[in-house]
Image (cartoon, rainbow, N blue to C red):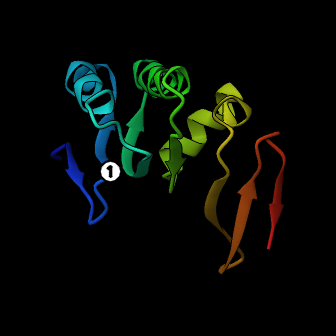
Amino acid sequence: MTSETKPTNDPSVLRIEGELTIFRAAELKLLLLAEPMAQAIDLSGVTELDTAGVQLLMLAKKMALATQRKLSLVAHSPAVIEVFELLNLAAYFGDPLVMTQRRGGAATSSTSNATGRSYES
């Protein structure tokens, strides 16, 4: 499987695809901290996330805060949500986690707010 990072139609959004792991840490660090810094990171294409990837996302968020910029993590993939829930990181990033869950053949939408609590709609 190929891993890549590609621009979206919106230049302020950085879309990460494939692995967000130690094997791509150096490449992704340059992209995450490049000027002008993205206002949103689209995580819908992330297939794997490890602690090095989490550290990169934390660094990007920290750098945005230090330079008084807004940075949102959006469209969390199931792989990202699994790690965020395991490490209880939803509150740290402060971005809503939105995913679709399948229950008995029916899809429901579940959103987790900054406190880590989830609700269904």
The answer to whether residue 46 is above or below residue 120 is above
Residue at x-position 22% and y-position 54%: 7
The answer to whether residue 20 is above or below residue 26 is below
Residue type marked 1:
Arg
Residue at x-position 79% and y-position 74%: 121
What x and y, as percent, mark residue 49?
Answer: 43, 33
Relative side of 13 to 59, left or right: left
What x and y, as percent, mark residue 63?
Answer: 46, 21
Relative side of 119 to 73, left or right: right
Total numbered labels: 1
120, 27: nearer the viewer: 27
33, 48: nearer the viewer: 33
Relative side of 32 to 69, left or right: left
Residue at x-position 19% and y-position 25%: 27
Give the labeled residue for mark 1.
15
Q: Secondary structure at mark 1?
A: strand
For label 1, the crowd category at 10 Å Cα-Cα, with few meaning under 14, some 14 to 19 and many 20 or more, is many
The answer to whether residue 66 is above or below residue 114 is above
What x and y, as percent, mark residue 34?
Answer: 26, 30
